[in-house]
Structure formats: C-alpha cells, structure tokens
Image (cartoon, rainbow, N blue to C red):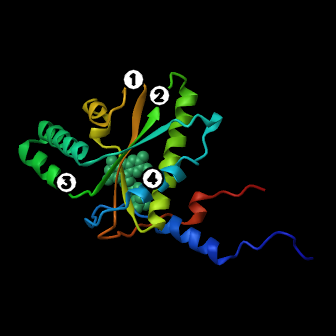
Amino acid sequence: MKSDAPSYETQELREFAEVLRGRRTIELFLQTPVPRELLKEAVEAATWAPNHHVTEPWHFYLLGDTAIERCLDLCEDIVSTKKGAKAGNFKRRNWSEKPGWLVVTCKRSADLLLQTEDYAACCAAIQNLMLYLWKAGVGCKWTTGDITRDSRLDDIVGFDGDDVFVAGLLWYGYPKLTPSQNRKNLAEALTELP
Ligand SMILES: Cc1cc2nc3c(=O)[nH]c(=O)nc-3n(C[C@H](O)[C@H](O)[C@H](O)COP(=O)(O)O)c2cc1C
C-alpha cells in the first residue's frame, strides 16, 4: 500500500543529524575572531527554544575585553584562594586563551516547578545556540564552574543575583582541536513499549 507520509530519508536530515552528533565541547580554540553578527544570529535562534508558558526566562550577555579581563581576575582569585597562587595563575593563563565569552542567565522563581521548567528552557536555548554556532564552524564550551556561582560575577556582568542565576558561561571560538566522544548504544537509551 502506498504511504502518503513524506520520506524522511533526505540528505538535509542526514546533514542535520551530523550537526547534532558532531558538535563537541571545545577546549582549545584558534584566536580567529568570531563575527559579532553571527553571535547575534545565534542568540536570536536560541530564543526559539521551547519554554513552558513562554516565560522566556533567559538573558544573554556577550562579554567584551574589559569584562573578560575582570572575569580572569575573578577566576584567578577563586582558584588561588582554593588551591594557591600558582594554580590560580595557571588557570588564568588557560582561561585567557578562550577567545569569546558569553553568559546566559535564567530567571529565578520561588515556584519549584516553574524554576525547573525555566532552567530546562534555558538549557534548550543554550543547546540551540551551540548548534547554530557549530553549523557555522564555531565551537563552545559550556561551564558551570565556581565562577558561575560567585556573586562577584553579578557585578562584572551586570545582573541582579536576586532575580536571576547563571545557567552557563560559554566560551566560543573556532576550534583548534575537536575531540571525539562516545555515547551508549540506542538500545540503552530507548525503551519501546507495545
Ligand atoms: C549544564 C552543563 C554544565 C557543564 N559544565 C561543565 C564544566 O563545568 N566543566 C567542563 O569541563 N564541562 C562542562 N560541561 C560540558 C560537558 O563536560 C560535556 O558536554 C560532556 O563532556 C560531553 O561532551 P560533548 O559536549 O563534546 O558531547 C557542561 C555541560 C552541561 C550540559
């Protein structure tokens, strides 16, 4: 019997899946600048993420040189306090190699369900953003390290920590090295019920 469903076995779909599978967390970046317009397009695309009640709980902050320098100071201070000056300086040098910095905040809510859903929406938005950039040849690293919970970051970035929290700090740039990754087989992730 002839099916009316359109074929899903298209080249575009295979290419789309390749973007989803191929995106990797990037540690090492080239210093080639990423066009600001591309970043803006990626943020706009990110805001099309699903979000329950369409709360649009996210905000995106593109950091410039001054803000990045202040983040490096903060990073060095956090790590030095925890692990000593040598470790702090090492981390600062490592982080100063990250060419682009972007902070994504999520609106706070006293309602636990709303808070969970809003955070989920922000994560979906971040994934949208990373996939858009990946398709354009730009990689990211999403971090939720100590700096994202340090209240001194609020002042650097310019948000009120009583109203929002950081869902992610993203470093972006053209990859110097793309690592490989594995995932479990589909059978381990999927259960099909009759
Ligand atoms: C919410 C979230 C927080 C993350 N935080 C960190 C982090 O603090 N440090 C880090 O090295 N990677 C972090 N990652 C990246 C993961 O380590 C990475 O996605 C994982 O190793 C799988 O690699 P892939 O992204 O290349 O598939 C985070 C990812 C997510 C989704």
Residue that label 1 marks = 162
Instruction: Give left or right: position of 110 versus 175.
Output: right
Residue 147 in which image quadrant: top left
Q: Is disc 2's CB within 8 Å of ligand 1?
A: no
- Vertical comparison of 115 with 101: above or below: above
Q: Which mark is residue 96?
A: 3
Where residue 192 appears, as percent x and y from the top left, is 70, 58
Residue that label 4 marks = 40
Q: Which mark is residue 47?
A: none
Q: Which mark is residue 108?
A: 2
Q: Spatial distance from mark 2 to mark 3, Cα to Cα?
A: 30 Å
Sooner in the amino-acid sequence: mark 3 or mark 4: 4
Considering depth in this image, is 148 or 66 the residue closer to the camera? 66
Where residue 148 appears, as percent x and y from the top left, is 32, 39
The residue drawn where x is 26% and y is 56% is: 98
The residue drawn where x is 30% and y is 43% is: 145
- Vertical comparison of 171 with 185: above or below: above
Sooner in the amino-acid sequence: mark 2 or mark 3: 3
Q: Spatial distance from mark 3 to mark 4, Cα to Cα?
A: 23 Å
Badge 2 crowding class, 10 Å Cα cut-off, few under 14, some 14 to 19, many 20 or more, is some
**What kind of residue is marked 2?**
Arg
Sooner in the amino-acid sequence: mark 1 or mark 4: 4
* Quadrant location, the C terminus: bottom right
Marks 2 and 1 in Cβ contact (< 8 Å): yes
- Vertical comparison of 83 with 138: above or below: above
Badge 1 crowding class, 10 Å Cα cut-off, few under 14, some 14 to 19, many 20 or more, is few
